[in-house]
Image (tube, grey):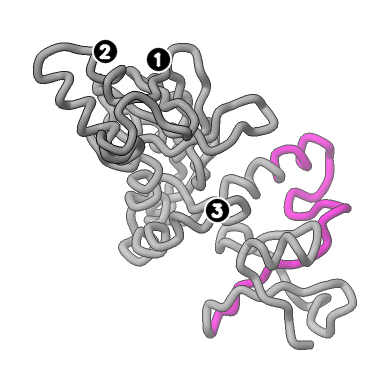
Amino acid sequence: MRVASLTAAAALVGGTGGYFLFDLLAPYLGPVEAAPTAVASPEIIVGQASVVDGDTLEIHGTRIRLHGIDAPESDQLCTRQHDKYRCGQSAALALSDKIGKGVVGCEPRDVDRYGRVVAVCRAQGEDLNAWMVANGWALAYRHYSIDYVPQEEAAAAAKIGVWQGAFVPPWDWRRSSRLADEGKRPDQSADCLVKGNISINTGERIYHVPSGEYYSRTKINPAKGERWFCSEAEARAAGWRPSRR
């Protein structure tokens, strides 16, 4: 269900439930005095949510991609204490347990190339996107947003969720799977030649271009968060700086 006003939200349920939805939607809609009947922002999608995977929900038939985060894919494996486990499944279960049977409200931000609504979703007033990253079950999707970088850094420091062991960032895992299916090296694309390296001494993110002095000796390890980029612009947008040599 989509609502664009507190009045409409109150009509969804009666009694104390109405007050719950007022609390849920207030962060999106602003003061009642300022917008008693409607707001100019996109309609908020409200209802019980089904979890598709760790970063995707469905509410009343609308597929919703959580803004600014990327969770392991459903069939992706990670390593914990030297044992492999289905981290994609774990991420989805964590999100499902967090939501339960409660009402979820999603504020649309965009529509992706697959036709999914990209949104910030909340349950009982809590940002679910942030919660997934803060608990280590999703990464900040820096390619599109840096909104949840602080939560990722805190989760990595605490070694929770996927940070308990080794894992491949989901965007690299998806690319590796496609390349493997095509019989290519799983760590490189012919069209993406910029190397995104992380310094073992400082943790600084540095990218190297083919003409650079250190390009040939730089190895990329996706399990450590390193990756390939298709352009310098893409590398800079993701937070990497150019090598000085």
Q: Is residue 163 left or right of residue 172?
A: left
Q: CA distance from mark 1 to mark 3?
A: 27 Å
Q: Residue furthest bottom?
A: 245
Q: Earlier in the sequence, mark 2 or mark 3?
A: 2
Q: Residue at x 59, y 79 (%)?
A: 199
Q: Residue at x 78, y 42 (%)?
A: 179
Q: Earlier in the sequence, mark 1 or mark 3?
A: 1
Q: Tell me the kind of residue under disc 1.
A: Met
Which circle marks residue 145 in the picture? 3
In the rendered structure, which segment of residues is drawn in magenta?
A: 176-201
Which residue position holds label 1? 1
Asked if the magenta segment contains residue 10, the reply would be: no
Q: Are marks 1 and 2 in contact (CB under 8 Å)?
A: yes
Q: CA distance from mark 1 to mark 2?
A: 9 Å
- The x, y position of residue 37, in whole percent, is 34, 24
- The x, y position of residue 109, in whole percent, is 53, 38
